[in-house]
C-alpha cells in the first residue's frame, strides 16, 4: 500500500512539472503563408484564388456579416464567391475571371482565428489572366468632410466612362489612402462611400463623394470628401435673435460652401410688414471668431485701464531635446461646410424686445445645389429683469467671520 502511494505521488509530480495542456496561450492573429496564384503571376488559368493561413481561421470575421464581405475583386464581375476550408479561403468572381485581364484581390482587415485574434491589416494579390499588366492606376485619400479627418475602410470604386460595366474596386487604409488599378488609360468616375451596412451600394443617409478623373500617362491623385448629400433642400433647425441687431439661423443640413453670402439671402419684417434692414450675412464660425477676438480685446483693454499693463505672454513648455513633435493630423483641403448663418441688421432698424418678426431665406443651397424659400415667425425675447429686492446670498465657500475677542476680565479691586 505504501509503495502504491509513493508511485501515485511521483506521477502527480511529473504531471505538474511541464507547461499547461495545449501549450502557451496564442495572441497572434492568423498570418498568410502563401497565395495561389503568386502575386504578379501572368497567364493565370484558374477558377479561384486561394489564401493559405498558418492556422484555422473563423468563418465569422470581425465587423462583417460573412467572409464574402471581406474580399474585393477588381475589376468587378459580380459579387465575390468565398469558400471557407479551415486554414484556407478560396475566392472567385460570381461570373468567373475574364480573359486578358489584370486583377487585384483585396482582403480587408478583420479575418480572425478561432481564439478571436483579429488581423488589423489587409492583404492584396495582383495577377493577370493575360500576358501583361497595365501600368496605370488612380491613387487618392478619403476624408470625412464634416469631421475633418481621414476615413479608413471606405469603399472606393472607379467606373470606366467608355464602358460602365467595368468597375475597379479598392478600400482606404488606416491613413485614408487608396489605390485603384492596375487599369488602362481613359476617363473614370471615382466614388467613395462610408458603407454603413456593408452592401456596397450608395444608400440614402450615407456619406459619399465622387470626382471625374482622366488617366493618361501618370497615376493621378484625387481627394474625396465624404459627407451626407441628398436632394432635399435645407430647412430651418432653429432661428434665434441674439440681441437687437444679430440673428442666428441654423439649418438642418450643411450648406453649399460656394453660396455667395449677401444681405439678400435673409429678409426680416415686422408684423406690420415694415422692413428690418439686413446689412450683413456671415458664416457662424466667422461670426464666432469675431466675437472671440472682440472679447479678448475688451479684456486686454480692461487690464490696461486697471493699471496692469499688457497681459503676460503665454509660456509653452519646451520640447524635449531630440524628440520630434508628431505631425498634425491630415485634413481635407476645404473646411467643413457650415449649417449656421448669422445675419446683422442696421442699428437704425433694430429688433425690439417683444416684437414678432417674420424671417425669410432665399437661395440657401444644399450640397447638391437644391434650395427653397423658407419662412418662420419668432418673437424677440424680453430681457429678464433683475430682482433688486432679493438679498445677496452669503458666500458659502467663505468661512464665517469670528466675533471680536473680548478683553480679559479684570480682577476685583479691594480697598
Image: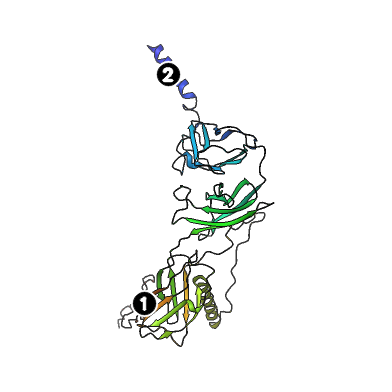
Count of number-bearing discs: 2
Mark sitting on residue 65: none
Residue carrying label 2: 9
- Tell me the quarter of the picture where residue 5 sits: top left
Q: Nearer the viewer, mark 1 or mark 2?
A: 1
Label pair 1/2, CB-CB below 8 angstroms: no
Residue at image location 52% in from the left, 79% down from the top: 298
Please, what secondary structure does the residue beneath circle 1 have?
A: strand
Residue at image location 56% in from the left, 35% down from the top: 31
The image's colour scheme reads rainbow
Q: Residue furthest bottom?
A: 348
Q: Is residue 266 left or right of residue 39?
A: left
Residue at image location 59% in from the left, 77% down from the top: 310
Camera sees residue 150? yes
Q: Where is residue 80 in the image (x, y as percent from the top left)?
A: 50, 40
Q: Position of residue 111 (x, y in %)?
A: 50, 39
Camera sees residue 175? no
Residue 177 in the image: above or below residue 388? above
Dot 2, how many residues are within 10 Å of its Cα: few (below 14), some (14-19), or many (20+)? Answer: few
Mark sitting on residue 378: 1
Dot 1, how many residues are within 10 Å of its Cα: few (below 14), some (14-19), or many (20+)? Answer: some
- Tell me the quarter of the picture where residue 274 sits: bottom left
Q: Which one is in front, 288 or 389?
A: 288
Residue 229 in the image: above or below residue 405? above
Q: Is residue 348 left or right of residue 186?
A: left
Mark 1 or mark 2, which has the lower sequence index? Answer: 2
Please, what secondary structure does the residue beneath circle 2 have?
A: helix
Q: Which one is in front, 310 or 212?
A: 212
Q: Where is residue 179 in the image (x, y as percent from the top left)?
A: 60, 48
Q: Where is residue 254 in the image (x, y as percent from the top left)?
A: 47, 65
Image quadrant for the N terminus?
Answer: top left
Q: Distance between the residues labelled 1 and 2?
A: 90 Å
Amino acid at each position: 500500500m505504501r509503495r502504491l502511494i509513493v508511485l501515485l505521488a511521483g506521477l502527480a509530480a511529473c504531471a505538474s512539472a511541464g507547461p499547461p495542456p495545449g501549450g502557451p496561450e496564442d495572441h497572434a492573429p492568423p498570418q498568410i503563408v502563401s497565395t495561389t496564384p503568386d502575386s504578379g503571376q501572368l497567364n493565370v488559368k484558374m477558377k479561384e484564388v486561394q489564401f493559405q493561413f498558418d492556422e484555422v481561421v473563423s468563418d465569422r470575421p470581425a465587423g462583417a456579416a460573412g467572409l464574402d464581405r471581406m474580399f474585393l475583386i477588381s475589376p468587378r464581375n459580380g459579387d465575390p464567391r468565398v469558400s471557407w476550408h479551415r486554414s484556407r479561403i478560396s475566392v472567385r468572381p460570381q461570373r468567373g475571371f475574364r480573359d486578358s485581364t489584370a486583377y487585384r484581390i483585396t482582403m480587408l482587415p478583420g479575418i480572425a482565428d478561432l481564439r478571436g485574434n483579429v488581423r488589423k491589416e489587409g492583404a492584396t494579390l495582383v495577377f493577370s489572366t493575360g500576358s501583361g499588366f497595365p501600368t496605370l492606376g488612380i491613387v487618392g485619400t478619403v476624408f470625412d468632410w464634416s469631421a475633418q479627418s481621414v476615413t479608413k475602410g471606405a469603399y472606393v470604386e472607379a467606373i470606366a466612362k467608355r464602358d460602365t460595366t467595368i468597375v475597379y474596386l479598392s478600400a482606404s487604409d488606416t491613413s485614408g489612402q487608396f489605390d485603384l488599378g492596375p487599369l488602362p488609360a481613359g476617363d473614370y468616375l471615382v466614388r467613395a462611400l462610408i458603407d454603413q451596412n456593408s452592401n456596397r451600394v450608395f444608400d440614402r443617409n450615407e456619406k459619399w463623394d465622387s470626382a471625374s478623373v482622366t488617366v493618361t500617362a501618370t497615376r493621378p491623385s484625387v481627394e474625396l470628401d465624404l459627407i451626407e448629400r441628398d436632394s432635399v433642400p435645407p430647412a430651418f433647425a432653429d432661428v434665434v435673435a441674439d440681441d437687437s441687431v444679430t440673428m442666428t439661423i441654423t439649418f438642418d443640413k450643411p450648406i453649399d460652401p460656394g453660396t455667395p453670402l449677401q444681405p439678400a439671402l435673409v429678409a426680416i419684417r415686422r408684423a406690420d410688414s415694415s422692413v428690418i434692414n439686413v446689412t450683413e450675412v456671415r458664416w457662424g464660425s466667422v461670426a464666432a471668431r469675431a466675437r472671440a477676438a472682440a472679447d479678448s480685446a475688451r479684456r486686454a483693454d480692461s487690464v490696461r485701464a486697471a493699471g496692469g499693463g499688457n497681459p503676460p505672454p503665454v509660456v509653452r513648455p519646451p520640447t524635449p531635446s531630440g524628440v520630434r513633435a508628431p505631425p498634425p493630423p491630415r485634413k481635407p483641403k476645404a473646411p467643413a461646410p457650415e449649417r449656421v448663418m448669422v445675419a446683422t441688421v442696421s442699428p437704425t432698424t433694430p429688433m425690439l424686445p417683444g416684437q414678432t418678426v417674420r424671417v425669410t431665406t432665399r437661395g440657401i443651397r444644399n450640397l447638391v445645389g437644391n434650395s427653397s424659400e423658407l419662412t418662420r415667425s419668432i418673437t424677440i425675447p424680453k430681457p429678464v429683469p433683475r430682482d433688486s429686492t432679493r438679498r445677496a446670498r452669503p458666500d458659502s465657500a467663505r468661512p464665517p467671520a469670528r466675533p471680536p475677542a473680548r478683553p480679559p476680565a479684570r480682577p476685583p479691586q479691594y480697598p
